[in-house]
Amino acid sequence: MKNIFYNTKRKSFILISALTVGGLYSCKESFLDVPPEGQAVTETFFITQEHALQSVNAIYGNLREWNVIAFAHLAVTTISSDDAEKGSVPGDAGFLDLYDNLTFTSTEGTLNGYWSGQYQGINLCNQTLNKIPAISMDENLKTRLLAEARFIRAYHYFNLVRTFGGVPLVTKEPETAEELNPVRASKEEVYAFITEDLTQASQVLPATYDAANRGRATKGAALAMLAKVKLYQGAWADVVNLTEQVQGLGYSLTPDFNQIFRISGENNSESIFEIQSQTLAGNCGAANSQWAEVQGVREQFGWGFSIPTEDLEKAFEPGDVRKDATILYRGELTPEGDQIKATAPNPRYNQKAYVPSTVTQDCGYGRDQNVRILRLADVLLMHAEAANELGQTDKALNSLNQVRQRAKLDPVTFTTKEDLREKIWHERRVELALENGDRFFDIVREGKAQQVFQNIGKTFVPGKNELFPIPQTQITLSGGTLTQNPGY
């Protein structure tokens, strides 16, 4: 059984919405000893050091929540891109076709789920950041827990700003009507807030933890996330600086690409941050994720959604070992010994979400699978891109070719800075395909969205489809305080 530290349930306000319960349990005999749902607990909570730990553990637990990591996440980040299409069978979850075709509107319910899931996490973080300082406890632990909450709050806001642009900045528990219905901050203000949270977190968080706390946010996670934030802002010198700091923390590429995504490969030498999951027999739903189940081979392992496109399949160079580790084919015999049905409804599935049948299915297929958010290869490719933009070609090639060497590919050849940029972007696509949800946002920041989607028969409207619409439910609940994005 994994060492996972999430072990509480507590109340939190979702922005402009109803009360909801967030947070889960740990692998302890006492994990069933929780208050009944629907009863307020804040009057007797945030008193002890254990409460402080539980509150932060609940923040991590929310990362596995359905709206944060399952349908809504896959719809917005992956099915909307050129790497994946809806999959499954015609008629099942037909609303996902709207994301596949970029024809969603502000009233599509999955968008509201994504918005609410992110703000649920933010409000759990705010509650912790507001309440823990008053608790009498070990000061070093207090400082670290507050830094963990800042890291995850920044992660949620990064998801929101890339998806919707400027969004309301909620930095504490709402107390007044105005605080319950804040206006949208600008994109620049949101990025500045994210940067502040991650900078503070990186100055406090440890580089490593003991086994019992494996999976918590580290200094490397904060620096790597901040590097990605700067990447999306084109702050190239900052990206080089931050990614080089991460490289100096002792991470190393895992030799076998396929093993990165197996349960045995979780939290390995390359891993920087993963959403931790596990099965707790007798308490299903407590600490597991449906990320893998949603994408597993239909009629055999899972539901069969978010399947690789033919365009992604063609993107891999001959001999690239990442292709077989990313795309699971109908009729294939996996390295782990599973025979994929020749009659599976779809020709291709996401092999990064594949969990061998030998792994327990007490709570359903793939519930133990961690979700990889940051790893060293991502950092190396960010470093390569930024170094190339600054004219530091040797640095760019060194980082890029480390990734290619692991993929069993020759060093890259190029003619110009622009040519090398395209090759780095391509490497980013095939290395991280179907994994951490960057692809749609990468296409947009690269300025290639209209061309990329046109090439695969989708219509991308410049000035509109760079962002998703603000959910109409949220605009209505705000009494019109929230404004809509252009084109919607």
Image (cartoon, rainbow, N blue to C red):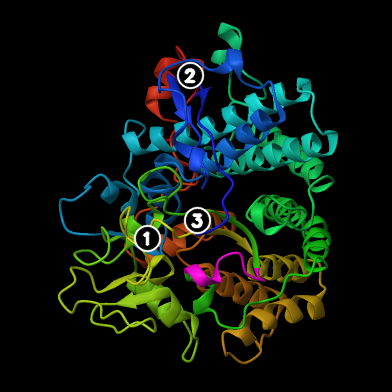
Q: Position of residue 299 (x, y in %)?
A: 19, 64
Q: Give the prevailing secondary structure in the magenta stretch.
A: loop
Q: Position of residue 463 (x, y in %)?
A: 49, 43
**Is residue 488 something one can see in this rendering?**
no
User: Which segment did they paint magenta?
Assistant: 263-270
Q: Nearer the viewer, mark 2 or mark 1?
A: 1
**Badge 2 is on which residue?**
16
For the C terminus, which image quadrant? top left
Q: Nearer the viewer, mark 1 or mark 3?
A: 1
Asked whether, in this view, residue 460 is left or right of residue 4, the answer is left
Asked whether the beta carbons under mark 1 and mark 3 sit within 8 Å of each other, the answer is: no
Give yes or no for residue 362 being in the magenta stretch: no
Callout 1: 10 Å neighbours few (<14), some, many (20+)? many
Give yes or no for residue 265 being in the magenta stretch: yes
**Badge 3 is on which residue?**
437
Q: What's the CA distance linking mark 2 and mark 1?
A: 33 Å
At label 2, the amino acid type is: Ile
